[in-house]
Amino acid sequence: MVEKIFTADAPAPIGPYNQAVRVGDFVFCSGQIPLDPATGEIVAGDVAAQTRQVMKNLNAVLAAASATFANVVKTTIFLVDMSDFAAVNAVYGEYFTETAPARSTVAVAALPRGSRVEIEVIALT
């Protein structure tokens, strides 16, 4: 059985998908871009500021699923420009201070709304 996860503390989906779903003990979070949940707009600033907003959004979705970053077992980072890797990695590292999850980082041609970064996570609860 698939359980839909939703919180008003993260951006509402901008397409036909859920913020996250729970299947058994796993929570699969959809990719988050740096949308401010209050305005629905991309946050101002550089890729570090965008990454910080992405992580805040993911934190809110995980909390709605009764999880934290400590429960995350796998992440995928999507970057428009691989030269942003170090800046994104620095912010990302602030959120995974104990055991870092498995991770992939992928360069893409573009992301929704002109975002420079998108991150998705899988958590075990």
Image: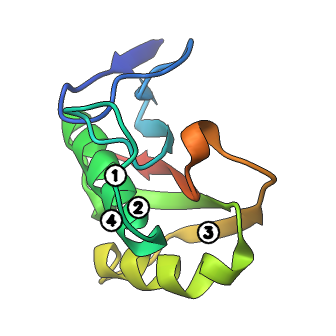
Labels 2 and 3: the sequence-earlier one? 2
Q: Which residue is mark 4?
A: 52
Disc 2 crowd rating (10 Å Cα; few below 14, some 14-19, many 20+) is: many
The residue under the point 56% across, 87% down is 86
Color style of the picture = rainbow
Q: Are marks 2 and 4 in contact (CB under 8 Å)?
A: yes
CA gap between label 2 and label 3 equals 19 Å
CA gap between label 4 and label 3 equals 17 Å
In the image, 100 versus 107, the foreground residue is 107
Q: Which residue is mark 2?
A: 50
In the image, 67 versus 14, the foreground residue is 14
What is the residue that sits farthest to the right in this orientation?
109
Disc 1 crowd rating (10 Å Cα; few below 14, some 14-19, many 20+) is: many
In the image, 121 versus 45, the foreground residue is 45
Q: Which residue is mark 3?
A: 103
Please name the amino acid that badge 2 sits on: Gln
Element type at mark 4: helix
